[in-house]
Amino acid sequence: MKKEDITALVVYVLMLALAIVFGFAVLRERQADSSLTNAQYIGYVIGGIVLGVVFNSALFELAHMAGAKVGRYAIISVNILGLCWYKNEQNKTKFKLGSYDGLTGETKIVPLSKAKKEPNPIPFLLFGSLFFVIEFAIAITLFVVFNATQDVKLIDVAYFIIIVAFVGLMIYVYNIIPTKLDSITDGYRLTLVTNPKNKVAFNELLRVEREIALGNKDVQIKTFDQITNFTADLNLNKVYVMLDQGNYDEALPIIRQIAAARQDISSNVYTRAMAQIVFILIMTSSLEDAVAAIDKEVDLSTRRSISKDASMVSIRAYILLAGLIDKSKSECVIAINSIQSAFKRTPETRKAIEIKLFNLALDKIIEKHPDWEFDQYRLKDYVPKTKK
């Protein structure tokens, strides 16, 4: 289980614990004094939760839209619980049902091309918290006012408002966690852009993703000399374009620059950079030269990390090491058997390229060991969702 999966599980458990405490300490206690029958009270609570989900989902995306305007961004799409409004290539607003990367919705933005100043992502990422604080302050004020009337029906209204606000609190807790979960949160992105090295890279990533989504195959991708986890990932966008075109020699210096910043990046980013180096060395050199270069650049500890890393890039590098250098069919099969779970975790824009690169690596092994019958493991071509 990956670190973000564990963190997400902890956050979900925390949210569940908060819901249980709220249910017993607030809602159950209120039921005895409510003006509603038991059946009505159940409907009242469910209605508050449903309204809370819808209202707060819309509120958070409205906050993102406001923050985007303040930060000098154009809004590409707004998705609230699967209801998506988006701008097409003619800049006309359209509607569709669609998936989203978030707990309850997602707003996609791109830097304004004519902005006089560098767009600032901070308002976009902070306004969700700001709007929730305002909502919570209003909810508490109304609760106190209605509660002071001693009118049972008005007090029921007060608790209904608190239910709606509590749902907002649950969404807020998830959204503000400053680490990567099963979806990308504002809290996580805030930790990125508060680093000055990453702010420009954040805007560049938004621009590149928009160009790719529009089908631009010749998009110009900027690379960054100051390497962090974030700028390394952005530089890899250019690497993947080069690998897709077979320009391995041009990709190698960019990857080596990432690996050279070992002290400034996470172990996963370093491991995958070294896996890219292993792949390129074996794909572009004779086996003898590749072994000599790998022995020089990749220590045993890093090779072990590559063998344990369940990512497409590490798997394709490891099957080359296991199949061509160690000549171990069983190790290749073990790695290949984890390819589907690794593929699911691969960013959408890289899936088609990763399949292509995996099949190229597999072809190397099939050529060396035709008796292993590895043809069955070839992956089918992938059509990105943006192209369907």
Image: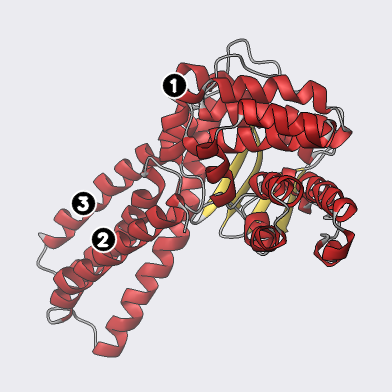
Q: Which mark is residue 367?
A: none
Q: Residues within 10 Å of mark 3 (few under 14, many from 20)?
A: some
Q: Which residue is mark 2?
A: 162
Q: Which mark is residue 195?
A: 1
Helix, strand or loop status at disc 1: loop
Marks 3 and 1, the one that precedes in the sequence? 3
Marks 1 and 2, the one that precedes in the sequence? 2
Q: x%, y% of residue 309? A: 56, 49
Q: Nearer the viewer, mark 1 or mark 2?
A: 1
Nearer to me, 152 or 296: 296
The amino acid beneath tag 2 is Ile
Q: x%, y% of residue 155? A: 18, 67
Q: Nearer the viewer, mark 3 or mark 1?
A: 1
Q: Is residue 24 left or right of residue 198?
A: left
Helix, strand or loop status at disc 2: helix
The answer to which quarter of the image holds residue 232 is top right
The amino acid beneath tag 3 is Ile
Q: x%, y% of residue 153? A: 21, 73
Q: Which residue is mark 3?
A: 140
Taking the spot 66% from the left edge, 46% from the top edge, the residue there is 347
Instruction: Say how many tags the image has.
Output: 3
Nearer to me, 183 or 104: 183
Taking the spot 41% from the left edge, 39% from the top edge, the residue there is 187
The amino acid beneath tag 1 is Asn
Q: x%, y% of residue 34? A: 17, 78
| Whether residue 265 is situated above or below residue 253 in the rendered picture | below
Distance, label 3 to label 1, CA atoms, is 35 Å
Q: Is residue 135 left or right of residue 104?
A: left
Taking the spot 71% from the left edge, 19% from the top edge, the residue there is 253
